[in-house]
Image: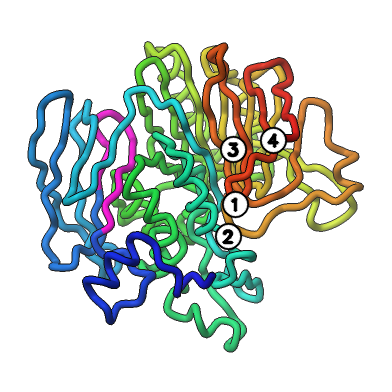
Amino acid sequence: MNLVKSVSVVGILFLAACAHKPADRVEGLTYVGLADGNTSFVRTIAPKNGQCPQARIVKGTEETELILNQNKFDSTVVCEATLPEGTTSVVVGERRIQIPASPKRIVVFGDTGCRLKGDYYQDCNNPNEWPFLRIVKAIQQEQADLIVHVGDYHYRESCKDPVKCAPFKDTLGYGYRPWEADFLYPAATLLQTTPFLFVRGNHEDCQRAHEGFSKLLTPLGENSCPKFQDTRYTKFGSLLVVNFDNATMPDTGLDPKGSEMTMWREHYRKMIEQIKTRPETEVWVVLHRPIWGLSPNWNGPAAVLPVNLNMQLLAKEMPFPKKVKFVFAGHIHNTQVSTGKRPVHVVVGEGGTALDHYDAATRKLIPAGFTVLPSTHGYMVLEQDAKNQWVGTVKDAEGKANYKCSLEQPQAPCTLQ
Ligand SMILES: [Fe+2]
């Protein structure tokens, strides 16, 4: 299956309407990003007639019209509007996106793009090398009511080999087209049906793809790049999902008393204080760089390296309140679960980009309290069992369950399926 030749629902729509366009464009794609109660948003990409559509907003039994305003990213028109607090569904044209009051089935995944950087070449047209589209198709079958992307959407930065890179020459760099090829097009069938919570990854930092992230996937649309965006608090009844931006924080330790760490400490402190004052009884924190993750040592003898040292220091200084049940992260390209005197910590970074494998020598060094599953592209589905405890099923790119992790049991065991 070739990405360019593959035909998605969106592809069919656009091919039918505009036969000269390649199938990997997403004109008219509408999606919803959840943020705070008053900053969640709807976006429509480059409508075919150039006019921004009207959305219909459903709030309980009320239905109102919402005008989308025109903005631009690169030279592409992006229509956007903020959703009124309490919106329960958004309708644009024939499409309806339902915002769950209390999500029962949640997919978490991350690190989805196709890595092209200098000499590093992942074949974006080979679904075995870059299986993001396969993963999206598998997730479609899950009928999830919420999708959390834990960051790193954009990987198509540069490509040196003139022959290998020829098919991708129009989709490199940080403009709109690489974003469309790396994320909007392959994810379109999910985006148009299910609300997303978008976390910023380090690939979306100020030297890389921040502009596209901000204009396509946040309520902000910033032109200047901040070290971090404000923390977002998305409420689903008694569950609060806290989206904490640590994309630009280095993984290696900063001077604990230095000005940069002081800035991060303040950002983190605000989140902890806000969580304490919120009425919700269950909190999940979603971020890109893990707090208690393990990375293999790429340059030197076998070792497992803690990721991220600065987040670990902050969590030690200001522990999470007890109601924080889980932390979900990406950044490392495998699936990990770790436990201790702190929230259960889950890394899910197998969404499509090249995987991080642990060799046998590295595996022997994994400390107690950490589970690192064999690296396989895919995603995690979260749902509650009969005892109302969250279970995370780790699935591959075809939707086959590989492991079930009982995240609320002691040591959060993962069992082979
Ligand atoms: Fe990352």
Instruction: Give the extent of the magenta segment.
Output: 29-42
Q: Is mark 2 on a helix, strand or loop?
A: loop
Going by the numbered disc 1, the residue's amino acid type is Ala
- Seen from the viewer's position, the closer of residues 174 and 410 is 410
Horizontally, residue 73 falls left or right of residue 146, namely left
Q: In this view, does 308 lie above or below 62?
A: below
As measured in the structure, the alpha-carbon distance from the residue carrying label 2 to the one carrying label 1 is: 7 Å
Q: What element carries label 4?
A: strand
Work out whether mark 3 precedes mark 1 in sequence or the reverse, and give the earlier one.
Answer: 3
Going by the numbered disc 3, the residue's amino acid type is Gly
Q: Do the residues labelled 2 and 3 touch (CB within 8 Å)?
A: no
Work out whether mark 2 precedes mark 3 in sequence or the reverse, and give the earlier one.
Answer: 2
Disc tally is: 4
CB of residue at label 4: within 8 Å of ligand 1? no
Going by the numbered disc 4, the residue's amino acid type is Tyr
Q: Label 3: how many residues lie within 10 Å, few (<14), some (14-19) or many (20+)?
A: few
Q: Is mark 3 on a helix, strand or loop?
A: loop
Which residue shows up at 79% across the image and 56% down it? Answer: 298
Looking at the rendered image, the quarter that the C terminus falls into is: top right
Horizontally, residue 211 falls left or right of residue 96, namely right
Q: Which mark is residue 397?
A: 1
Q: Are marks 3 and 4 in contact (CB under 8 Å)?
A: no
Horizontally, residue 388 falls left or right of residue 256, namely left
Q: In this view, does 406 lie above or below 333?
A: above
- Please state which of the two labelled residues, at mark 3 or mark 4, is closer to the viewer: 4
Residue picked out by circle 4: 403
- Pinpoint residue 376: horizontal percent, then vertical percent: 69, 50
As measured in the structure, the alpha-carbon distance from the residue carrying label 2 to the one carrying label 3 is: 42 Å
Work out whether mark 2 precedes mark 1 in sequence or the reverse, and give the earlier one.
Answer: 2
CB of residue at label 1: within 8 Å of ligand 1? no
Q: Are marks 2 and 4 in contact (CB under 8 Å)?
A: no
Q: Residue 258 carries which label?
A: 3
